[in-house]
Amino acid sequence: MNETRHDAFIGTTETARLLGIGLATLYRRLKEMGAKEGGEEEA
């Protein structure tokens, strides 16, 4: 029981970490695209 809960926690942490990296990469790309187009808009 404890091991299963521990594995689920690790899986959740790993998923959150990957999501964070993905969002950061996406945000950086959008920012670069906006800069190339000369847009001064901020999200």
Image (tube, helix red, strand yellow):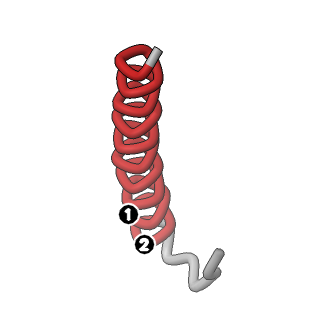
Amino acid, disc 2: Ala
**Few, some or many residues within 10 Å of mark 1 (<14, 14–19, 20+):** few
Q: CA distance from mark 1 to mark 2?
A: 5 Å
Number of numbered tags placed on the structure image: 2
Side of 17 relative to 39 (left or right): left
Q: Which mark is residue 6?
A: none
Helix, strand or loop under label 1: helix
Residue at position x 45%, y 42% in the image:
16
**According to the image, label 2 marks what residue?**
35
**Marks 2 and 1: in contact by CB < 8 Å?**
yes
Left or right of 10 on screen, residue 26:
right
In depth, the one of 5 and 41 nearer the eye is 5
Q: Residue under circle 1?
A: 32
Question: Could you tell me the amino acid type at mark 1?
Answer: Glu
Residue ID at (42%, 72%): 35
Mark 2 Cα shell of 10 Å, populated few (<14), some (14-19), many (≥20): few
Q: Nearer the viewer, residue 38 or 8?
A: 8
- Give the image quarter of residue 15: top left
